Amino acid sequence: MWKSIGKHFKLPNKLSKKEVPDGTKASRRFRVLILGPANAGKTTLLERLTDSPAGASIVTRNGKRIKEVPRGYDQRGIHTIGDEITFKSNPDLVFHDSGGFEAGGVEEVEAVWQFIRKRSLASPSQQLHAIWLCIPTDNDRPFGFLQSGFFSEPTGSVPVIGIFTKLDGRKTKIMTEVLGPAPDPSDFLNCVPEVEQKVAEFVNGLETQFRNQQYPPAGFLRVGKMHEVTEQSIASCTQLLRVTMDSLPDETQRSLLYLTVWKRNRRIHTIYVLQR
């Protein structure tokens, strides 16, 4: 089954065999810049996507592993945007994270732009393919990147995907507001439709803010309850990959993303194929 499925998505020969200018062979690695404030669910998202246990991330700098990084590696000062974050279960997916970007400071935003410009034009083995912007919905704070001017210029061939995370946290918060401090147990079920409606209105409002930017994200999705391996969390990962794939500019990059997932996470791949 897996062999027959794989025939439909093969990398072009020019990518798998041709030498690139720096003398190395083109790497079959898909590279993502993941942005968002601390505690936005970035770590959990990557663990589900790579089918990895908590705290399994590996951080390398200039090809050298720098340290064991505990859960919550996205805290400021732990790493720089140029560091590669990978997981043993799927080394073909490479992530970069910019700590401090949520502050919206000039230096932080400029560092992100320098990275995007440099990596969008890099050799195949170092090229940036996508940007995932994690937007936590469990708090009411204004997001710095909306005021930072980040969406005032295009990212070229590197699509930005907006990911509304922690929907379960938003639901809990709204449910508390609806039911009050001492609800009757029977009230929980009755308030579900109202809570779902308020959550949808809140996230729809956020999405509208992003869509109204000069250069908005190429796609959006909403995720929640990512802390456990469930059918819902795996389906959310599959949806993220589909939105990303649909936003990529050419078939070579789409094939590359497909193969990196197909080789390493067959649970995601199975759902992906069935949905297609």
Image: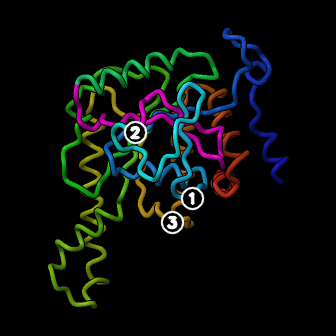
Secondary structure beneath dot 3 equals loop
**Dot 1: few (<14), some (14–19), or many (≥20) neighbours within 10 Å?**
some
Q: Viewer-nearest of labels 1 and 3?
A: 1
From the top left corner, tell me how far across and down residue 207 is, in percent: 30, 45
Secondary structure beneath dot 2 equals loop
Left or right of 64: which side holds 133?
left
Q: Residue at x 28, y 70 (%)?
A: 172
Of all residues, the one furthest to the front in this rendering is 67
> Which residue carries the number 3 mark?
228
Can see residue 197?
yes
From the top left corner, tell me how far across and down residue 227 is, in percent: 46, 62
Disc 3 residue type (three-letter): Glu
**Dot 3: few (<14), some (14–19), or many (≥20) neighbours within 10 Å?**
few
From the top left corner, tell me how far across and down residue 6 is, in percent: 79, 43
Q: Which comes sooner in the sequence, label 1 or label 3?
A: 1
Disc 1 residue type (three-letter): Pro
Secondary structure beneath dot 1 equals loop
Query: Residue 53, which numbered label?
Result: 1
Left or right of 131: which side holds 107?
left
Query: Residue 7, which numbered label?
Result: none
Between 144 and 220, the one nearer to me in the picture: 144
Region of the chain picked out in magenta, as a range: 78-105
> Which residue carries the number 2 mark?
78
Q: Which comes sooner in the sequence, label 2 or label 3?
A: 2
